[in-house]
Amino acid sequence: MERFQYAKNAPNPTGENQYAAGRKRRPRGPRSTLVPLHPKFDLKTRAHAYYLQNHFQVFQDMPEIVTTWAECLHKWRADNKSSLIVDLAFSALALSVYARFQNCRSAETEACTFYLELLQHMQGCILHIHNTNPDADDIDAYLLGAHFMARYESFVQNHDSGTIIKDFKQIKVWYHFEGAAAVLKFWYDHRPQYAPTWVIKQSRRKLIKSSLIREQPLPGWLADGNIFGESDVALDFDSLIIRFIDVHQRYLKVKQAGADGEPVSQGLNDLVSDSRKLGHNLLDWSTRLPGKWQYLKHKLPETSNFPQDEFYATIVISCAKLGYSAVWTEYYALRMLTSHTHLRILDLLAPQHSFEHRPETLEGLVELTSSADSLAAIIPFCLKRIQINSDQRLNRSVEISNEPFQPYLASLVVWPMSLASSLQKLEPTQKEWFRSALCWVSRESSECLLAYAMSDYWALR
């Protein structure tokens, strides 16, 4: 009886179809449809996914002092904020990058459509900003939109190595910086109504860098970083950048006055003193950084065959976290700028045939070369061209990575390498390496102005 009951309830071993045999009636109603295993996404969604995955990743453990726009956008979205301006601007940029790297002509067309719509919308917002009384979220959206529009212009117009070189200071990118400056100035004038956000802070930093690279005076209202949310070591570094811009602007004025035959001796002596003090203060700042941000030096194995365009020398630098390396690239870039301007000032004070300031000039050249060596040494780590085994880090074990280049890493190095490749007093071999590295990083990423990386158009005086 038990065996009979088991056999009655057991599955049909022959796999006979009960419906076909007429033993059961099929249920009524519509039949279910097959769900595709790989649903189709529209072009915009695919472009967003590609751009975020390959060109705009958020860095983990990134110190606040070197926050990137990826962290700003992530924080903005994490606060459940949304904006048509941000969506249009980000979509235009993502689609243009997708079109370039995935060879998708339709993405390029769609990017242009988004961008033209965005231009009309953005112009109306900025022109009437004083009449609309925007809230804090609106201001953040305007600034994010201006940033992505600038990125779009720089990528679309200057990414091709065959681009016709225009006057660097007249390219369209700066129009969006000027728009961002107008928005940020509105925030500054009405600051009792607002609190500084990540976007506010990052926008100001970008405006400062644009003044630096274009050798323009910094507007006085931008000078106090504390107003815009800077604090601690970030505020100290911020003040050093502001002081450098001031010293460099004074140098340009003294240089022009001397060329016009005006007496400049007293102003020049004060300038030398201030420039020298700035260099000392910058060095002191680096000694007060948190211990976990410190770096280690390694030597590549003698048997390693490393590519010359990725490694300047056999000495490389690593940090405990990738984000920490960005602190040092910014630091060494500013040290190089400070040393370079100091040497320029000494040239005005004592012509090259005079030996009066020869020792200080030689010291400045050594400082410039040393800072360039350090910056070049940390670039491979920033770009993940080397691997450090964490359990052997103190033993300085290093291996060369053969992994494909990840484009989002370019944001860690493009700014400092742009500055390094612009310094005329840098050793020719160093300058050429920075320019070569900047070119291949720019070509493989959505960062930088590739055509200008291969020219002298942004050489600092």
Image (cartoon, rainbow, N blue to C red):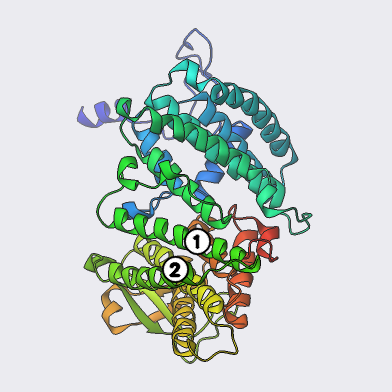
Q: Confirm whether residue 182 shows in the render.
A: yes
User: For residue 428, which numbered disc appears in the image?
Assistant: none
Q: Nearer the viewer, residue 447 or 17?
A: 447
Q: Nearer the viewer, residue 340 or 309?
A: 340
The residue labelled by disc 2 is: 271
Looking at the picture, does residue 187 appear above or below residue 201?
above
Residue 255 placement (x, y as % from top left): 58, 67
User: Left or right: where does residue 435 sit relative to residue 340?
Assistant: right
Looking at the picture, does residue 65 appear above or below residue 291?
above
Q: Secondary structure at mark 1?
A: helix
Crowd rating for badge 2 (residues with CA inside 10 Å; few <14, some 14–19, many 20+)? many
Amino acid type indicated by mark 2:
Leu
Q: Nearer the viewer, residue 250 or 70?
A: 250
Amino acid type indicated by mark 1:
Arg
Quarter-of-image position of residue 104:
top right
- Residue at image x 29%, y 84%? 395
Q: Secondary structure at mark 2?
A: helix
Which quadrant, please, contains the C terminus?
Answer: bottom right
The residue labelled by disc 1 is: 250
